Image (cartoon, coloured by chain):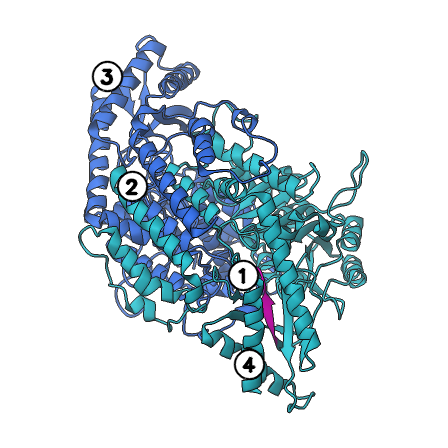
Chain colours: A blue, B cyan
């Protein structure tokens, strides 16, 4: 495709995207296709010749649009917000259009330095101290793996450079809660710690946040048994209920035992943009003064969630990036240049060698949308979630099941005719009315389990979601629950 | 940013990209900025208000363009080709514009199924048997890590589900050559095997390909010593010289010991699109017949290199994806749906949970550019590399240092006045003339070490590179070498 062909086709695609975003409210939120339906609609090989962009746009309409759950829809309340702001989409296009590749600083100095600058912008905007250095990873799943690999090596005396984890005498243990994201367990297994060395620490039964006394007991029991506590993963805003682990107390236990503290704020990091939510990060920072004791080692959060920088864009901040570099660095001859030693080599801060120019989408997002407008949107969503929680609380048939510190409301409907102790029947009812809402196409929310029973998670914060959309959801919920009851 | 604002700004950005690609030949190839220069050109915080897209485009011109090495330039011969075809750029924009997110099949059935279909298209186009199932990863670095994690668990009796790698009695060993990509060593360390359990098997001194007899000796020595050979990573097209490890012989040794065979064809995979290059993959396939013995376990290659699907797009093919699923799967309640069990959950085939709709860029690339046109371009590049090798060979002051099976020519100039045994002086000369070429801005190539001495790697295959560009490079090389000599 020549530049001139790209110009024409690009205009057509931009128009298609603008039209698609403008009509989103009229589409069903949940994907309407059945398993295998999309695959069956496509040929087993691409056509021999060259196709015009119009053929692709027609296939987007025919096959792809019905085949995705429209998370950009104003009535999407599923999972966590996964906003792909159009401003950031432009930044991502600029990245692909430039076609730069990050292999070393030399291969694209601007790719490295704009990333450094934009990560520092985000550090300042979220109130972190200059102790933190940032890098963009694809997701928080990868970020927690990277952090746990660094933790493993620090606790294990850099066994990777010798006989490997097998040569490390004391079993290394990791601590989190059952409410941590599934990627934490996955990272523990992938890093080789083993499931038996993962401790799911008890949570407070009301807040669902980590119980630091239980953490202390678990750590001390392991130490007594000859094991070596390597890391704790604390969550700010758990996936189930947006619980906030008590970081100051968690950090205090971890520091006594030299453990790595990784903070997973995948969702809640966006709230740190709001000064009134900086309390979320209490305990994160090292103490003031020359020794700088305390604090966490790493923090990850996803601008690609609530804030709305298009997937994939996860920020990972570290107090001491050398801990990563020591574990990740490579120095093949074909990547050396005269600038080495004076510049950041981001390849040593993560897994891939070749890196996209992801900083551009954050850069475009912040500058084209403006930080104050992003903050206003986050505050709107927090207000809407509080409003919904009030409506649910005020209805005697409904309950809010967990605190609502952020923008997610966990709700359950108890039908008047159902015995209060019949949990299985209540589960069937919950899943039935949630499915009725989702099948309507008029809104989408995600059922999840809490204390072994199903509930509805209403996660407010799609970019176009206004109060009227939340009100319409609440009406749909009540109607569906009544009809299912 | 509203859809209408996106329409206007998107047209402006598309035009900017078209103009940028059209003028590439007039830009210096290598980035011209000094360390810190880009960062110094940016403010310490984004402006308070909203900026127009023109401000961003002006900054792209002022700060970013001079700060990247133009790997899309017709005279880029550095590293390996890193083509970002404009057709694939459109597919990537479609992905971001749609704003779908892959968490489960349900979150975006089309994201999963188009990926399955397009991976299968690529399987057919590269002549692989239906034994292979594909998935898109970000890079081959991640793909080899994923493969080695699966290999570790298979060889270690799925220790991750128990006491972890530390509980696995026999040390697990991994085999590759010193010519394998740096990401292989990195993956071995990250997976926890330990550097002492990595064997860099000898290579043939002429072809730089793995010596299978040396592999056999290394494996047997480890078995005798009580260690457990877990995996071998064979390379088709090494980064230094595009050497091709002898897969049939490597597989034969590996199969005797139940080892995982991962094939890293990051560069050379593109050549499999050409029927006349299918020999590269000899040994990859299982034997015909019901037992299907032999063959490799996994194969990774990067359409984002020579083929030109924009970064990041690495294909990972597996004979038995269940080996990955068993190691990677998670099943949190909030991701369950009625379709589970009947559909592919790609989150269990890799590290991240949230996945971009990367298949669209391959889909657009294949359909808008056409497979035959892509093949014609690859053949053009192979011809150009052969032509350059002939010129180098014909000049008595120059040598081609390694076979040229693909599109990379390894060359060295021996100045008439330099003693043939003064290797250090020759190194200084090589680095001097290569730097002179690169500093001119008129072409770019990468010095690298071979047998401990510097050489120039000329990697042909930027999308717009024609014979005249290769001829101009050769002229530049000779002039620079003469002036430096």
Q: Which residue is mark 2?
A: B7
Q: Which residues are magenta?
A: B455-461
In this rendering, position of residue A250 left or right of residue B386? left
In the picture, the quarter occupied by the N terminus of chain B is: top left
Measured Cα–Cα span from mark 4 to mark 3: 86 Å
Horizontal and vertical percent for residue A423?
41, 17
View extreme (top): residue: A417
Which of discs 4 and 3 lies nearer the camera? The answer is 4
Which of discs 3 and 2 lies nearer the camera? The answer is 2
Chain letter, disc 4 residue? B
Mark 3 neighbour class, 10 Å CA radius: few under 14, some 14 to 19, many 20 or more: few
From the viewer's side, name the closer residue of B138 and A475.
B138
Mark 1 secondary-structure assignment: loop
Q: Is B111 within the magenta? A: no
Chain letter, disc 3 residue? A
Q: Tell me which numbered mark, 1 or 2, is placed earlier along the sequence.
A: 2
Tell me if label 3 and label 2 are in contact, CB under 8 Å: no
Q: Tell me which numbered mark, 1 or 4, is placed earlier along the sequence.
A: 1
- Name the residue located 72 percent from the left edge and 53 percent from the top edge: B280
Horizontal and vertical percent for residue B400?
68, 73
Residues at marks 1 and 2 on the same chain: yes
Mark 4 secondary-structure assignment: helix
Measured Cα–Cα span from mark 1 to mark 2: 33 Å
Which of discs 1 and 3 lies nearer the camera? The answer is 1
Chain letter, disc 2 residue? B
Which of discs 1 and 2 lies nearer the camera? The answer is 1
Q: Where B465 sits versus B452, above or below?
A: above
In this rendering, position of residue A182 left or right of residue B266? left
Q: Which residue is mark 1?
A: B465
Q: Which residue is mark 3?
A: A396
Q: Is residue B443 visible?
A: yes
Residues at marks 1 and 4 on the same chain: yes
């Amino acid at each position: 495709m020549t530049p001139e062909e790209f110009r024409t086709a690009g205009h057509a695609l931009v128009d298609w995207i603008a039209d698609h975003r403008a009509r989103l409210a009229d589409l069903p939120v949940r994907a309407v296709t059945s398993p295998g339906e999309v695959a069956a609609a496509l040929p087993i090989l691409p056509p021999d010749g060259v196709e015009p962009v119009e053929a692709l746009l027609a296939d987007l309409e025919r096959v792809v649009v019905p085949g995705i759950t429209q998370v950009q829809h104003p009535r999407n309340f599923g999972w966590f917000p996964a906003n792909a702001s159009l401003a950031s989409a432009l930044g991502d296009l600029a990245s692909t259009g430039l076609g730069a590749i990050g292999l070393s600083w030399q291969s694209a100095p601007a790719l490295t330095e704009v990333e450094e600058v934009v990560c520092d912008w985000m550090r300042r905007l979220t109130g972190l101290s200059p102790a933190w250095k940032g890098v963009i990873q694809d997701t928080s799943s990868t970020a927690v793996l990277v952090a746990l690999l660094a933790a493993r090596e620090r606790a294990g005396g850099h066994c990777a450079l010798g006989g490997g984890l097998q040569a490390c005498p004391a079993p290394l243990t990791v601590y989190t809660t059952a409410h941590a994201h599934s990627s934490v367990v996955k990272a523990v297994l992938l890093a080789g710690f083993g499931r038996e060395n993962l401790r799911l620490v008890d949570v407070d039964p009301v807040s669902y946040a980590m119980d630091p006394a239980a953490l202390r007991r678990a750590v001390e029991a392991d130490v007594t048994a000859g094991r070596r506590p390597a890391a704790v993963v604390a969550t700010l805003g758990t996936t189930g209920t947006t619980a906030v682990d008590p970081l100051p107390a968690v950090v205090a236990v971890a520091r006594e035992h030299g453990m790595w503290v990784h903070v997973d704020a995948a969702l809640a990091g966006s709230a740190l943009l709001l000064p009134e939510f900086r309390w979320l990060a209490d305990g994160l920072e090292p103490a003031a003064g020359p020794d700088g004791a305390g604090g966490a080692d790493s923090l990850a959060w996803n601008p690609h969630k609530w804030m709305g920088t298009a997937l994939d864009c996860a920020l990972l901040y570290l107090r001491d990036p050398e801990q990563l570099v020591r574990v990740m660095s490579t120095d093949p001859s074909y990547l050396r240049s005269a600038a080495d030693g004076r510049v950041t080599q981001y390849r040593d801060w993560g897994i891939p060698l070749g890196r996209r120019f992801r900083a551009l989408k954050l850069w475009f997002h912040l500058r084209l949308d403006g930080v104050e407008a992003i903050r206003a949107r986050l505050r709107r969503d927090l207000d809407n979630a509080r409003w919904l929680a009030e409506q649910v609380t005020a209805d005697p048939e409904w309950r809010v099941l967990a605190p609502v510190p952020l923008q997610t409301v966990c709700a359950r409907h108890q039908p008047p005719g159902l015995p209060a102790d019949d949990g299985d029947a209540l589960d069937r009812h919950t899943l039935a009315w949630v499915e009725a809402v989702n099948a309507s196409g008029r809104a989408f929310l995600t059922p999840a389990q809490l204390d072994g029973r199903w509930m509805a998670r209403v996660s407010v914060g799609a970019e176009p979601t206004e109060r009227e959309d939340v009100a319409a959801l609440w009406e749909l919920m009540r109607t569906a629950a009544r009809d299912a009851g």
